[in-house]
Amino acid sequence: MANHTLNNHTTWLDKAEYPFTSKYFDVNGEKLHFIDEGQGETLLFVHGTPSWSFDFRNVIKKLKSDYRCVAVDHIGFGLSSKPEHYDYSPPNHSKTLEAFVLEKDLKDITLVLHDFGGVIGLDVAMKHPERIKRLVVLNSWLWSSEGDPDYIKIRKILKSPLLPFLYRYLNFSPKFILPKSFGDKKLSKRLLKQYTKPFANKSQRNGALAFAKSLLNDQDWFEELWQKRSSISNKPTMFIWGMKDDIIKPHYLEKFRSGFSNTQSLELETSGHFPQEEQPDDVAKTIKLFVSK
């Protein structure tokens, strides 16, 4: 029944763009939406903000003939439940992802992580390194940004009492921040709708707001993760980086490379923050080559 009620509200969903079968995982009394497509070695896709598994759709379409592609929507995002009152912090999303991986008994996983999906997924990887075979990281981070000049500028905005208003009432994150974070290729209005519509009303926008607040509140946790990375730092790792990202800039890629010993990289010169949406063919091809080795 719960699946049915969740799906009632998805008349906006473009099934031609996202032709996957919706599945649900019960957690904390809520429904975590996920897709599980194809067969073979497991690729687990973990999104950031303000997106959902939709942003990986074109990569998954290309890879599902050879691999099992599993992609989750964090609680508060995409087609998952969006309770008004909930612990939407990244450490809690990480616990949810861990519960999902253990319940589904996923093994030999290639993690494909983007943005906040990086800290969330890598935290799970450090807790269960025996389940993780490889890492693919797109425009993400794993340390405190406290001393970063760009972060210091953003922090003033994050502290603004206006921020919750912008997020809740104007749907600010998907409507304005997301399209501005692209490189040369711009997001069409038709596709932008697939990112704004999951956050239908103000009570459903607290997940995205919590990620913004996390940038203020969780810097120590990010740094702790960086310090504990040794259990995964020698896993085969592919960095796929949009070099025109104004927020997570190329020096983040350099820092990642400095802390992981077995790495390859694809630098996409014209891509911004969302390589999987901007250049999905290149991303899929690179993942396929990386995993098949």
Image (cartoon, rainbow, N blue to C red):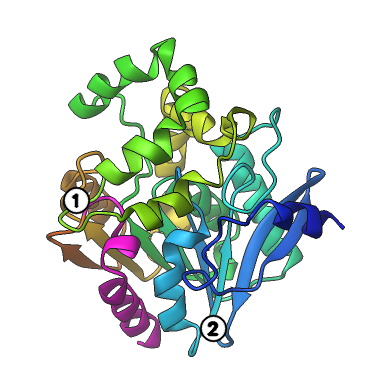
Instruction: Give how far across and how far down residue 78 sits, in percent.
Output: 57, 51
At x 35%, y 32%, the residue is 144
Q: Main secondary structure of the magenta part?
A: helix
Amino acid bearing label 2: Glu
Q: Nearer the viewer, residue 179 or 12?
A: 12
Residue 277 is inside the magenta segment: yes
Amino acid bearing label 1: Glu
Q: Quadrant of residue 128?
A: bottom right
- Residue 261: tell me if it is visible: no
Query: How far is the residue under mark 2 from the one under mark 1?
Result: 29 Å
Instruction: Give how far across and how far down residue 211 sits, in percent.
Output: 48, 34
Q: Secondary structure at mark 1?
A: helix
The answer to whether 184 is drawn above or below residue 146 in the figure is below
Q: Nearer the viewer, residue 235 or 273?
A: 273
The answer to whether 46 is drawn above or below residue 69 in the figure is above
What span is in magenta? 272-293
At x 38%, y 88%, the residue is 292
In the image, taking residue 87 as reference, residue 168 lies left or right, namely left
Q: Secondary structure at mark 2?
A: loop
Instruction: Give how far across and how far down residue 254 sits, in percent.
Output: 19, 51
The furthest residue to the left: 269
Q: Which residue is mark 2?
A: 41
The total of numbered circles placed on residues is: 2
Badge 2 density bin: few <14, some 14–19, many ≥20, Cα 10 Å:
some
At x 58%, y 28%, the residue is 202
The furthest residue to the top: 161
Marks 2/1 in contact by CB < 8 Å: the verdict is no
Q: Quadrant of residue 150?
A: top left
Q: Which residue is mark 1?
A: 254
Look at the image and tell me in which quarter the C terminus lies: bottom left
